Amino acid sequence: MNTQKIGTKCVQAGYTPGNGEPRQIPIVQSTTFRYETSEDMGKLFDLEASGYFYSRLQNPTNDLVAAKIAALEGGTAAMLTSSGQAANFLALFNICEAGSHIVSSSSIYGGTFNLISVTMAKMGIESTFVSPDCSDEELAAAFRDNTRAVFGETIANPALTVLDIERFAKAAHAHGVPLIVDNTFPTPANCRPIEWGADIVTHSTTKYMDGHGVAVGGAIVDSGNFDWMAHADKFPGLCTPDESYHGITYAEKFGQGGAFITKATSQLMRDLGCIQSPQNAFYLNLGLESLHVRMPRHVENGQAVAEFLAGHKLVKSVNYPGLPSDKYYERAQKYMPNGGCGVVSFELKGGKAAAEIFMKNLKLAAIETHVADARTCCLNPATSTHRQMTEQQLIEAGVPAGLVRISCGLEDKEDLIADLKQALDAVQG
Ligand SMILES: *Cc1c(COP(=O)(O)O)cnc(C)c1O
């Protein structure tokens, strides 16, 4: 096991060049790979030998970057996907099928909520959503005989709720299923869910891991800790022979540490093809090399902005787990003692009209459907992502009309606060 600290892993893990080889991860921009004999290639198709044959399933550049992310999260294996959406879909679909059921935190990214509640429902996969703050009894009551996974986000986008990872992992394990945690917002620089009992970790690498608004991507990491064979009746895809691979049983052939990612690659990536391009994997690695340096700055700016907003007379409320007054402060201190991320949300007393004037007057912070970028950006969900909702529906969805989400970048906090201040002055008119 790699015992290096997180910063060293960000810079060096995953790739150690041999004598005379490129210092930086090479971009293997090739769809296919050459073999001497059909027999050599046949061994790859039978999963008897490991190697590359077609970049819809696997590519060397991607695998080096995935190995770095596995090291960062403390997992045994990882893979890159074309987006965060693809990562969460593959992670769930690798162990769910028609007739399965998922227990999920209700406080998750809107795209993932839609994926589970609408699209996966069309595939015959049911779900039950629970509040991240539900009681142990409510959580236990959400499970059914056909439950196959529990899902949540370390820090939810955009609600900024914090998941009690240990408690959700305990409930999942008591019911013989894994906990899948989307760790996009804190990144492994600030939280490593596997250390708290999560079995599978997913990422939208589009966010802080890339960090520069360059490439859409995702990742899945396996902890290697879930004993599939001990619950073989629940996971036939991993624990019984795969006829599309000459009767291989993944959990037997690749063990507890390799079965999940091997199956997701050789079966789901083969059939669905949602792989990240090697060029994007290269950009992602450039982002990872400075992740541990950037995250503390995002946190510093998020904290400063949250404190400034909390003290401003035009601001009704602020959500930021780093504020001692925040509902999730204690939980965030436990799981993320060095801070979570740079995303803050707040509500203006003047509602939607005030939010519009405020955002129009911002000079540094741009209006974007994005977060976790080097450049500060913001969004008013009521006039953008949630535009189709009525005032009443917005209140029920927990997205009041005057709510603004601001993702603090890497600029100097004094300039960010000055920008917010002049925009708030404009609201006051
Ligand atoms: C953005 C996001 C996703 C979706 O990722 P894409 O890369 O946009 O597909 C999933 N989960 C969280 C927490 C996100 O912030």
Image: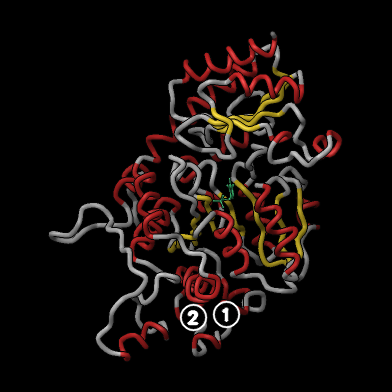
What percent of the width, then of the height, locates residue 310? 65, 18
Q: Secondary structure at mark 2?
A: helix
Q: Can residue 397 be seen from the camera position used here?
A: yes
- Badge number at residue 423: none
Quickly name the residue at label 1.
239
What percent of the width, then of the height, locates residue 362? 57, 21
The residue nearer to you, when weighing 389 against 261, is: 389
Is 101 placed above or below 289 here? below
Is 49 placed above or below 306 here? below
Q: What is the CA distance from the residue labelled 1 to the residue labelled 2?
A: 7 Å
- Identify the residue at horizontal 47%, vertical 17% (top origin): 415
What percent of the width, then of the height, locates residue 385? 69, 41
- Identify the residue at horizontal 55%, vertical 38% (top origin): 371
Labelled pair 1, 2 in contact (Cβ < 8 Å)? yes
- The quarter of the picture where the N terminus appears is bottom left
- Badge number at residue 252: 2
Is 260 placed above or below 335 here? below
The residue nearer to you, when weighing 417 against 148, is: 417
Question: Mark 1 CB in 8 Å range of ligand 1?
Answer: no
The residue nearer to you, when weighing 47 against 169, is: 47
Looking at the rendered structure, the kind of residue marked 1 is: Cys
